Amino acid sequence: MKDALKTLERVKKFEIDEQRRVLMQKLAREEELQKTLKNLIEEYEREKEFVSQNPTLCDFGAYTDQYVKKRRALEKSIAEVQDEIENIRDIMAGMFKEQKTFEIVTQNRKNKKNKELAEQEQKLLDEVGTNTYIKKHQQ
């Protein structure tokens, strides 16, 4: 039974490491999307400034429509990634809870074994003390 519990602990640790790796990928993806959104907004502001200085050169309305579509798509992607991140964190919280349960069970077993050993040692010491007392009083 002890080996099975250790195996479960190792499996749970592996699963947590795997989820942690996935989480890091999702966080990197979110950061990448946030940077892309920031760059898109900065580019739009530059274009807006250029058009305000040169109003006859281009159709800013069409550019704005494309900008709004791109921005909404990016914001939707960011929201999806954030939902995935939240789900992964919830899964990891459950895994940590299970792992902690395994650790508590292992510690309880260890404490029980230590207590049994201490009791056996105390019985042995009591027996040695009793035998010494008996030998001393027989003489």
Image (tube, rainbow, N blue to C red):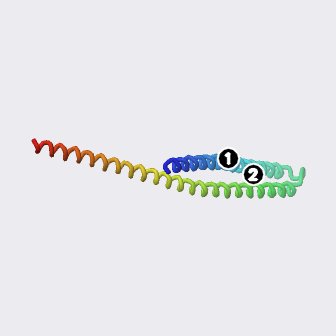
Q: Do the CB atoms of the residues marked 2 and 1 lie less than 8 Å apart?
A: no
Picture coordinates of residue 76, whole percent (x, y): 74, 58
Residue visible at 54% across and 53% down in the picture: 96
| C-alpha separation, residue under disc 2 versus residue under disc 1 | 24 Å
Residue visible at 59% across and 54% down in the picture: 92
Between 116 and 31, the one nearer to me in the picture? 116
Picture coordinates of residue 55, whole percent (x, y): 86, 53
Up/down of 79 relative to 118, above or below: below
Task: Indicate which disc residue 95 carries.
Answer: none
Task: Indicate which disc residue 25 carries.
Answer: 1
Q: Is residue 25 left or right of residue 51?
A: left
Q: Element at badge 2?
A: helix
Picture coordinates of residue 15, whole percent (x, y): 61, 49
Between 87 and 108, the one nearer to me in the picture? 108
Q: Residues within 10 Å of mark 1 (few under 14, many from 20)?
A: few
Residue 129 position by quadrant: top left
Task: Indicate which disc residue 41 carries.
Answer: 2
Amino acid on which the number 2 mark rests in the picture = Ile
